[in-house]
C-alpha cells in the first residue's frame, strides 16, 4: 500500500496573458486566471492541481478569488495529516464540509491524483483503467467576433494544417445578425473543415426553435447548449426538432444531471469538464451514465493551462466514452505557460502526456513571474 501523509496545501493565484482576446456571449477576456494548488506530503511528494473558471464567475458562479479562500480556509486544512491516496474518502470529507464549489474541489482532487501517480511512478490514466487512446483530436474555439476576424483566423489555422474542426461562440449579438454572421463563416469554410456553435445558454426556447433550423440548413454540424442549463425539457424538444446533434454543457455538471438528461433524451453528446463536475472521479461517473444511455462524450475545456489540460488529457485518454474529440486548446490560446515541458500538439491532435502523475513539471520561474501580487490593504 502507498501512504502519502498530507503536510500542507498551498494556493497561489496566477494570471496568464492570452495570445488574442477571447469573446464569450457575456464578456471578452485578454487573460485567464488560475489557482495553483500544491499538496505536499511527508514523503516528499508534491501534487499539483489547478482551478480555473472561464474568464470569471459568469459561467459557474465560482470566482478565482473565492476558490482560493475556499481552499485556504476549508478544503485544504481538512486534508492535513490524511492519506492523499484515499481520494474517494477525502472527496467525501470535502463534500461534508463545503456544499457545492465543484471548481475548487476539482483542483484539490487533481493535486491528490498527481501526488498519488508520482508516488507510484505511473501516469494518472493508469489510475483510471489505463490508456485507451494515445491522442485526442482538438477542435479550435473561435470567439464571438465579426465574420471577417473569425474567417482570417480560420484561414490561418487551415493554412498551417493545425485544425480542421472549429467551434464558434455565439450569443453576443442579436440572433438574426448572429446567425447571418455564422452562415457567412460556414459558407467560406465550406468543405474544408467542420463548424459547430456554442450559445452558452444565450437563447430561450422560442429563439432556438426559430433559428437553430437555419443553422442546421447552413451546414453547422453541432449545436452546444442553446438554452439555459436548467431547461432540460427545452433541450429535449430541440433534440427532437433537429437532425444535427445537441451537446449539453451547462446542463450537465453532476452524475445526477447526466441521469436526468439521459432520461429526458435532452442531448446527443455530453461535454465533460473536470472543474464543473468537481473532479476526475465525478467526470468518470458522468461518462459511465452516458455510456449506459448511449450518449457520446466530448472532452470539454474551461480554458485550462497546461496543468489542467494535462489532467483532462489523462482522463479523456483513459475513458472509452470520449468518442467526440476534445476542445483542449487552452495552452494554445495562452501566450505563455507554467510548465517546463509543454504539451504535445501535432496535426490537430493532443498527445496524452506519459510521465508520472499529470505528466507535467512546473516552471517555477514562470509561476513566480505570473503569481498575482498581494498588495497591502
Ligand atoms: Mn460550452
Image (cartoon, rainbow, N blue to C red):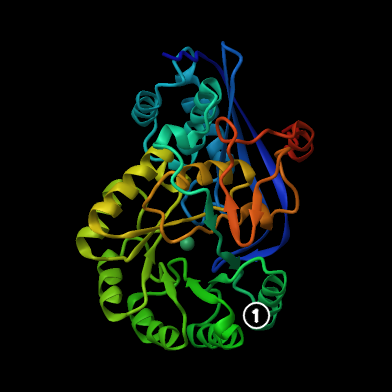
Q: Secondary structure at mark 1?
A: loop
Report which quarter residue 128 is drawn in.
Answer: top left
Q: Of 287 and 207, which appears nearest the observer?
A: 287
**Residue 343 is at least partly visible in this image:** yes
Residue 191: x and y in percent read 55, 84
Q: Is residue 324 above or below residue 220?
A: above
Assess disc 1: are there few (<14), some (14-19) or many (≥20) residues with their C-alpha within 10 Å of its C-alpha: few
Is residue 122 shown left or right of residue 226?
Answer: right
Residue 30: x and y in percent read 70, 59
Q: Of 172 and 112, which appears nearest the observer?
A: 112
Q: Residue at x 42, y 73 (%)?
A: 223
Q: Residue at x 27, y 48 (%)?
A: 256
Report which quarter residue 192 is drawn in.
Answer: bottom right
Q: Is residue 79 above or below residue 183?
A: above
Residue receiving disc 1: 146
Q: Residue at x 49, y 27 (%)?
A: 112
State the quadrant of the C terminus.
Answer: top right
State the quadrant of the N terminus.
Answer: top left
**Residue 101 is at least partly visible in this image:** no
Q: Residue at x 70, y 53 (%)?
A: 334
Residue 232: x and y in percent read 28, 64
Residue 234: x and y in percent read 28, 71
Amino acid at each position: 500500500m502507498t501512504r502519502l501523509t498530507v503536510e500542507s496545501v498551498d494556493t497561489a493565484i496566477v494570471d496568464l496573458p492570452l495570445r488574442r482576446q477571447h469573446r464569450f456571449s457575456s464578456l471578452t477576456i485578454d487573460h485567464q486566471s488560475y489557482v495553483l494548488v500544491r499538496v505536499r506530503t511527508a514523503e516528499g511528494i508534491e501534487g499539483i492541481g489547478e482551478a480555473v473558471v472561464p474568464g470569471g464567475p459568469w459561467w459557474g458562479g465560482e470566482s478565482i478569488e473565492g476558490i482560493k479562500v475556499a481552499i485556504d480556509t476549508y478544503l485544504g486544512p481538512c486534508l492535513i495529516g490524511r492519506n492523499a491516496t484515499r481520494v474517494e474518502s477525502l472527496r467525501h470529507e470535502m463534500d461534508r464540509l463545503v456544499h457545492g464549489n465543484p471548481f475548487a474541489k476539482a483542483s484539490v482532487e487533481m493535486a491528490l491524483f498527481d501526488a498519488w501517480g508520482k508516488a507510484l511512478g505511473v501516469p494518472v490514466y493508469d489510475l483510471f483503467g489505463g490508456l485507451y487512446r494515445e491522442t485526442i483530436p482538438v477542435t479550435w474555439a473561435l470567439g464571438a467576433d465579426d465574420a471577417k476576424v473569425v474567417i482570417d483566423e480560420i484561414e490561418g489555422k487551415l493554412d498551417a494544417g493545425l485544425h480542421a474542426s472549429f467551434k464558434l461562440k455565439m450569443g453576443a449579438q442579436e440572433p438574426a445578425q448572429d446567425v447571418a454572421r455564422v452562415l457567412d463563416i460556414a459558407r467560406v469554410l465550406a468543405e474544408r473543415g467542420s463548424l459547430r456553435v456554442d450559445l452558452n445558454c444565450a437563447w430561450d426556447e422560442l429563439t432556438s426553435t426559430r433559428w437553430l433550423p437555419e443553422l442546421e440548413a447552413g451546414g453547422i454540424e453541432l449545436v452546444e447548449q442553446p438554452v439555459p442549463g436548467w431547461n432540460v425539457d427545452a433541450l429535449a424538444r430541440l433534440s427532437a426538432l433537429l437532425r444535427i446533434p445537441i451537446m449539453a454543457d451547462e446542463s450537465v455538471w453532476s452524475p445526477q444531471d447526466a441521469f436526468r438528461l439521459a432520461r429526458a433524451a435532452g442531448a446527443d453528446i455530453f461535454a465533460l469538464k473536470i472543474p464543473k463536475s468537481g473532479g476526475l472521479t465525478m467526470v468518470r461517473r458522468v461518462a459511465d451514465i452516458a455510456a449506459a444511455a448511449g450518449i457520446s462524450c466530448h472532452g470539454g475545456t474551461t480554458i485550462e493551462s497546461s496543468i489542467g489540460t494535462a489532467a483532462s488529457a489523462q482522463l479523456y485518454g483513459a475513458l472509452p466514452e470520449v468518442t467526440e474529440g476534445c476542445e483542449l486548446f487552452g495552452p494554445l490560446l495562452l501566450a505563455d505557460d507554467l510548465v517546463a515541458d509543454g504539451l504535445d500538439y501535432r496535426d490537430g491532435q493532443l498527445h496524452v502526456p506519459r510521465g508520472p502523475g499529470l505528466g507535467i513539471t512546473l516552471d517555477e520561474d514562470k509561476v513566480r513571474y505570473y503569481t498575482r501580487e498581494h498588495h497591502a490593504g
